[in-house]
Image: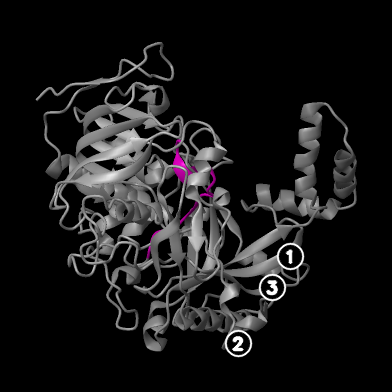
């Protein structure tokens, strides 16, 4: 993989390639990697570079006019090689079969593809993400090598669910980062153009064919990229923003002939259903906590949770939602103290914190012994001493065309209009999480587990919206549908009515389920890569020669030539 920097190129270059991918996050680099070593020339266009840059990050500024969202974009989105995988926590789970179905009680639901058609892609996505087997139900007990709980959930109303955590290929304590090291270095057909911000998608006069994209650096350098296929992998907000802002040739924006680009903005509204007494919560933390699965690829970490059953969702017209435990570790947790002492010894300094860590260890020998017992005899992670234990929930959103991304009257430093977000949450979301909370209390009572003290706001009829927070999972703004009047892209992720333009990422999801989106993003990206490879792109390629502006070389510009 070869790196180039737009800031060092001669101005107004014209670059020709076979496949141009805009964005180097999990979607973009997963697609690029599928073409590594082929005769298809790939150019990945990335807004950032190899290091963090505040000026580049400022291009993510938004204007919010809906339900309050996380406005500090630095903690939820990243313009850097590897994209937002630079800061994600690595939680992975697939969507349910139900999420793909058309449901009478969920308007605008239903995908153009079946859930079962993605199984092979989910397996392949797991390899990119460094996760364990493609299994997320109670078949896992045997693989965990622990005893199945003696009493099961009443699966007519609640079902057990699991998430697993991505693992970096060199550092098991970090999730996959999709930046440096994800792609082999010796791949001559993959080029990356960094510090290049796409400012316009240029079509033919009729708006039916994408001809090129315009890219600009913060120091004013400009270039034009022409490709046989261009894939937008900019995220759930930026994909829509870029299509809407590309209105010089088509006034309503590229692919927006049916006024659908930017609509159906969803997220995973997160909320605290209740809390547990940290001292008495040990039993519930043992059952609905973390588990280890060891196989030939090392150790994989899973989290156990609870979701509404499909039957109950249909019967009571509820949305898909799931809950899990979130723990704030106490300051004097002995296992945190061990890590603190290790760090002090490694640095050769005895700090006040090291003394506090030593005291925490010496005064809690039983906790240390119990942790060792769990680790080495029960094959379970330790249960850290908790300051607070909460029951947290993700709920899918009811698709709403009035929940949307539009263009602001404010502009960034490149002259691009900011994204104006009008995110809406419906009463159906509150009803769904309220029902889940009460069912969990009933089930925990039956199973002789400590019950949470439920949050007061769950019973409020008004003013409850601020208790939900977005989870930085913007979804649905270029939704998939076979009908151009119902969606922006078709089943192959090509923009309706715009030949050569494709979209990857969570913006194509028609519904969002409760599961974190990255696993599904990568799976759908691999599916798109296969379709491009075998159905769309030619066997003869456009040869790109970079002889200037290489970051790691002495040359200073770019030349392109066509080998056809």
Residue 237, by quadrant, is bottom left
Query: Where is mark 3, residue-wise?
Result: 275
Foreground: disc 3 or disc 2: 2
- Drawn side of residue 490 relative to residue 137, left or right: left
* Structural distance between the alpha carbons of marks 3 and 1: 8 Å
Residue 122 spot, x, y in % from top left:
34, 52
Front residue of this view, candidates 3 and 68: 68
Looking at the image, which residue is at 44% across and 82% down?
A: 156
- Drawn side of residue 545 relative to residue 273, left or right: left
Residue 539 spot, x, y in % from top left:
11, 32
* Structural distance between the alpha carbons of marks 2 and 1: 23 Å
Nearest to N terminus: mark 3 or mark 2? 3
Is the residue 446 above or below the residue 288 in the image? below
Query: Where is mark 2, residue-wise?
Result: 459
Front residue of this view, candidates 416 and 527: 416
Residue 161 seen in the figure: yes
Front residue of this view, candidates 294 and 222: 222
Label 3: element kind = strand
Nearest to N terminus: mark 3 or mark 1? 3
| Circle 1 residues within 10 Å: few <14, some 14–19, many ≥20 | some
The residue stretch that appears in magenta:
81-95
């Amino acid at each position: 993989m070869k790196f180039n920097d737009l800031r060092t190129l001669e101005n107004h270059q014209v670059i020709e390639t076979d496949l141009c991918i805009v964005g180097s996050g999990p979607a973009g680099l997963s697609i690029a990697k599928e073409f590594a070593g082929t005769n298809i020339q790939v150019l990945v266009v990335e807004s950032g570079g190899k290091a963090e840059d505040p000026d580049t990050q400022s291009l993510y500024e938004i204007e919010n006019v809906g339900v309050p969202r996380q406005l500090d974009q630095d903690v939820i989105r990243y313009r850097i090689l590897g994209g937002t995988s630079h800061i994600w926590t690595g939680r992975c789970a697939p969507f349910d079969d139900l999420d793909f179905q058309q449901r009478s009680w969920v308007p605008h639901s239903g995908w153009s593809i079946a859930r079962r058609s993605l199984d092979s892609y989910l397996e392949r996505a797991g390899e990119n993400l460094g996760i364990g087997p493609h299994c997320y139900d109670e078949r896992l007990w045997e693989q965990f090598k622990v005893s199945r709980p003696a009493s099961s959930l009443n699966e007519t109303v609640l079902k057990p669910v699991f998430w697993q955590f991505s693992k970096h290929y060199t550092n098991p304590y970090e999730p996959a980062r999709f930046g440096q090291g994800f792609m082999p270095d010796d791949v001559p057909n993959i080029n990356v153009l960094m510090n290049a911000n796409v400012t316009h998608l240029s079509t033919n006069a009729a708006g039916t064919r994408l001809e090129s994209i315009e890219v600009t650096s913060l120091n004013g350098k400009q270039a034009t990229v022409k490709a046989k296929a261009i894939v937008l992998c900019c995220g759930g907000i930026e994909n829509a923003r870029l299509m809407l802002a590309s209105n010089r040739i088509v006034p309503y924006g590229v692919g927006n002939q049916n006024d659908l680009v930017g609509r159906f903005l969803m997220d995973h509204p997160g909320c605290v259903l209740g809390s547990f007494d940290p001292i008495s919560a040990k039993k519930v933390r043992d059952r609905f906590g973390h588990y280890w699965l060891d196989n030939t690829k090392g150790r994989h970490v899973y989290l156990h949770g609870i979701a509404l059953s499909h039957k109950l969702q249909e019967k009571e017209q509820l949305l898909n939602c799931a809950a899990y435990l979130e723990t704030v570790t106490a300051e004097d947790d002995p296992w945190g103290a061990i890590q603190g002492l290790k760090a002090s010894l490694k640095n050769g300094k005895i700090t006040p914190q090291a003394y506090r860590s030593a005291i925490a260890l010496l005064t809690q020998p039983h906790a240390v012994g119990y942790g060792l017992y769990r680790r080495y005899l029960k094959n379970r992670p330790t249960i850290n001493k908790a300051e607070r234990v909460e029951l947290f929930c993700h709920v899918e959103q009811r698709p709403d065309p009035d929940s949307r991304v539009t263009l602001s009257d404010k502009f960034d430093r490149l002259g691009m209009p900011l994204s104006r977000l009008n995110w809406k949450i419906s009463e159906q979301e509150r009803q769904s999480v309220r029902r889940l909370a009460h069912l969990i209390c009933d089930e925990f009572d039956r199973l002789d587990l400590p019950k949470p003290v439920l949050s007061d706001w769950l019973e409020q009829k008004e003013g409850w919206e601020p208790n939900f927070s977005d989870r930085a999972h913007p979804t649905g703004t270029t939704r998939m549908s076979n009908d151009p009047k119902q969606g922006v892209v078709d089943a192959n992720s090509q923009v309706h009515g715009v030949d050569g333009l494709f979209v990857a990422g969570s913006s194509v999801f028609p519904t969002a389920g409760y599961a974190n989106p990255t696993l599904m993003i990568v799976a759908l990206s691999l599916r798109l890569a296969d379709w491009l490879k075998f159905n769309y792109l030619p066997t003869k390629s456009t040869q790109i020669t970079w002889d200037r502006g290489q970051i790691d070389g002495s040359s200073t510009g770019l030349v392109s030539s066509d080998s056809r």
